[in-house]
Image (cartoon, rainbow, N blue to C red):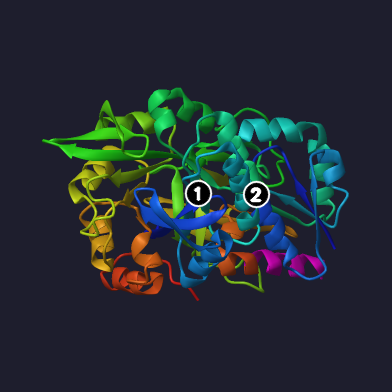
Amino acid sequence: MRVTLFDYGAGNLHSLSKALATEPGVEVHVEEDPLRAVDTDVLVLPGVGAFGLAAARLAPGRNTMRLALERGLPCLGICLGMQLLFDSSEEGAGKGLGFFAGHVQRLAARRVPHIGWNQVDEDSTLSGAKLETVYYAHSFVCRVADPSLVTAWTTHEEDRFPAAVRRGKVVGVQFHPEKSSTSGVAFARAFLREVRS
Amino acid sequence: MLTRRLIVCLDVKGGRVVKGVRFEGLRDVGDPVELAQRYEREGADEVTFLDISASAEERETLWDLVRRTAERLFIPLTVGGGVRTVEDVGRALRAGADKVSINSAAVARPELLTECAERFGAQCVVASIDARKEGERYRVYTHGGRKPTELDAVTWAQVCVARGAGEVLLTSIDQDGARSGYDLELTRRVADAVAVPVIASGGAGSAEHIRDGLTRGGADAALVAGILHDGLTTVGAIKSLLRSSGLPIRSTP
């Protein structure tokens, strides 16, 4: 199974590549061109950087990628990658993929960025892995138009925000599975197994 | 609820973890990749590499080491020591670091924090502050605690955050290595003054000291080095004391 990381010039992809490659039969590729990135079995939108810069890199392939997801291409969006699955963000200009209806907003909390390990509630994202305490490093969160697409929640101070969203084979997570130790890696692997079948 | 973090710090030189007193009498204590992985297994929430290399050649070794570590470590990795430019930060992140801590270079040119936050996001910019008590105030020192500045630690922490730092790593020079506990007053003053996570550093001699840093000091996280490397206590023992004190702590399966 080919898994492609869309590299929009952000940062560290090493841990994520290795975490995904721990699943047997998975071959991980890194692709900078958004049009070529969809020529794969599973697309991964990684999670470091600023929305505006990432949206600009995505722009030439935005429609193609959105169409590929609508047609059933499995996709895992992580942190900023999850936010790119939404319409827009107050962090920066440009359009996200709009696969999920909603807007990305700054966390409503005193302590921002939200950095550290936090608990996940009501997780029903995957059948093969249960989320408990996961690692976050972000200042913005997704406000989802249809709350029934939220499959897990986390609370920072008074702000309860989506830890995960899912529609079909497209999953977005606000935390970093590749930084959430054994259980985070197990989550990423369970995602790959679930969308393969 | 956000849990409190226990961060393990490893001093790295020439691609190896070393231990010494004030950079003298350095002794090799092991391979950074293996030690980092061991601490992850034991339940550490993050790992920090503090680079104490002197030469450019050793610098190259560091990036290779960060790369090899990031491929096998599945908890956050911070790199600190000798980071001077936006390019250095970009290089560390590309090599596989999740965060970079900046100390002397930020004092010399505070705009550096802003440039890094704009380019890479505030969540990866850690302002590292070394402070020493002088009368009623705390003075900021740079260059590994050797060079005094005119800055007040609490005010400087606020400036760093306004400039874009997403975390503050706060080290008490007076307490560092003394194993008599963190400087709780310093920690509390800074934690109350800024709205980003504060990491207490310098002085932990026991699990109780770490608990006090998080409760009385108000820190979000505690940085620990010597007492773990010397086997005086373990990550598991520290975490179980913190948990039994009622603090939210991540448990490891």
Q: Is residue B217 left or right of residue A152?
A: left
Range of residues picked out in magenta: A187-197
Q: Chain of mark 2?
A: B
Find residue B169 and report its horizontal and vertical position in percent.
Answer: 37, 44
Q: What residue is pinned by disc 1?
A: B78
Indicate which label's residue lies in the foreground, 1 or 2: 2
Q: Nearer the viewer, residue B86 or A68?
A: B86
Q: What mark, if any, has residue B64 been given in the picture?
A: 2
Going by the numbered disc 2, the residue's amino acid type is Asp
Q: CA distance from mark 1 to mark 2?
A: 15 Å
Q: Nearer the viewer, residue B192 or B230?
A: B230
Main secondary structure along the magenta-highlighted residues: helix
**Quick check: B158 left or right of B39?**
left
Mark 2 closeness class: few <14, some 14–19, many ≥20 residues within 10 Å? some
Residue at 31 percent across and 35 percent down: it is B146
Badge 2 marks a residue whose secondary structure is: helix
Q: Amino acid at mark 1?
A: Thr
